[in-house]
Image (cartoon, rainbow, N blue to C red):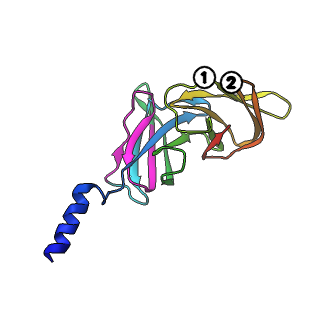
Amino acid sequence: MTATFLLWLAMVTSGVVQTALPLSLHIRVFRGQAEVTRETTVTVYPAGARTNGQPAPVADGGERRLPLAAGQYDLQLVQQQDGKVSGIVWTTLRLLVDYPGEGGHHLEVLNFEKEWGALEVRAQGPHQSGQVGWRTRLLRKDGTEVARGVDGEGYQLVVAPAGTYDLVVEGGAAPVRIADVDVKANLTYVRTF
């Protein structure tokens, strides 16, 4: 018994036994293409619960952020304009896991307009921070522009109606065009180039 306790104590103090670190849930909120993150309160609940929610505060970069354990969550969004509630939406069963390449940060883009989605566009390689030196656009097959990217921490975010578009990345060594990129309603996808 004493030997087992001493072995356990040695493992704990040497760092062999580790607890899972919380992930960082990053949230941006839109109404169509207009960002409304700052004027929208976001409360995060365990999936299926409607009590003991955790508010997600606004961080320096303008996103709402909250450290959470991996799991499924429901989110309540309440948008206010001129001191009055202008929209309330629930989004359910959002999955938070440690996705490869996200560096423990997971971005959820939520939209008050139905049938809109988002692309989080990142350069291949390690997770970057700060603004990127390139820009993104979504184009229809006829070349008309659907949306332009907005800055995020190490990414460009493109918000558009659900559909299939071409993604154009400009500002690097040479423009990159990725054909037939799907924007799915009510989802955020990560695309790398």
Q: Which of 20 and 39 is in front in this view?
A: 20
Residue sitting farthest toward the right: 142
**Residue that appears at 22% across and 67% down:** 8
Residue 20 placement, left or right of 113: left
Above or below: residue 54 compared with residue 131: below
The stretch in magenta equals: 52-78
Q: Position of residue 43 (x, y in %)?
A: 39, 44
Give the percent coordinates (x, y) of residue 83.
Answer: 39, 27
Q: Nearer the viewer, residue 170 or 113?
A: 170
- Between residues 121 and 82, which one lies in front from this camera angle? 121
Residue at left offset 55%, top offset 34%: 30
Tell me the crowding category of disc 1: few under 14, some 14 to 19, or many 20 or more residues within 10 angstroms, Cα based: few
**Residue 70 position in % (x across, y down):** 43, 55
Q: Contact (CB < 8 A) between labels 1 and 2?
A: yes
* Front one among 161 and 11: 11
In the rendering, at what x and y percent does residue 150 appear? 59, 27
What residue do we see at 25% from left, 62% from top? Answer: 11
Q: Which mark is residue 133?
A: 1
The answer to whether residue 170 is above or below residue 17 is above
Q: State the residue position of label 2.
A: 172
Residue 181 falls in which quadrant of the image? top right
Three-letter amino acid code of the residue under disc 1: Gly
The answer for how far apart the CA atoms under marks 1 and 2 are is: 7 Å
Does the magenta portion include 51? no
The residue under label 2 is which amino acid type?
A: Gly
